[in-house]
Image (tube, helix red, strand yellow):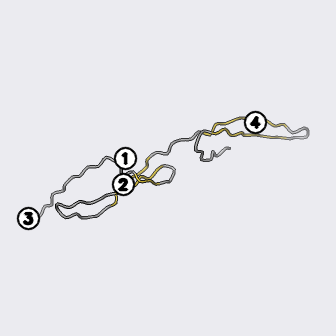
Amino acid sequence: MLTAPSVTANQTATVTASYASGGPTRTNSVSVTVVNVAATLSGIAVTGPSSVNEGATGSYLATGTWSDGTTSNVTSLATWSTTLVRSAAGC
């Protein structure tokens, strides 16, 4: 069984099997390409202030979590929108 390591570009690995039973050892190999698979986005976290005064601004950061366990700043790549939630005060 081959557990492929992480690679930054496609790489060739050689899998070799040897067997001896009462005579000469027999060996054979096969070449296997370990394919570099781009990580996929598995989650996104948004951080920033929990309240902003009217007329003021708040800055927010989007951090992506990837299928390979890494994280990165995706703030400039994210599509942002704002929805105002009306309170039920006075009802």
Name the residue type under label 2: Ala
Q: Residue at x 87, y 39 (%)?
A: 25
Name the front one of labels 3 and 1.
1
Q: Residue at x 75, y 36 (%)?
A: 29
Measured Cα–Cα span from mark 4 to mark 3: 78 Å
- Of 42 and 20, which appears nearest the observer? 42
Label whose residue precedes the other's in the sequence (3 or 1): 1
Q: Which residue is mark 4?
A: 29
Is residue 24 rendered to the left or right of residue 84? Answer: right
Mark closer to the observer (2, 4): 2
The amino acid beneath tag 4 is Ser
Q: Which mark is residue 90?
A: 3
Q: Check whether the beta carbons of the residues at disc 1 and disc 2 lie within 8 A of each other.
A: yes
Q: Which residue is under mark 1?
A: 77
Q: Which mark is residue 32?
A: none
Q: Secondary structure at mark 1?
A: loop
Which residue is depicted at the point 24% across and 64% down? 51
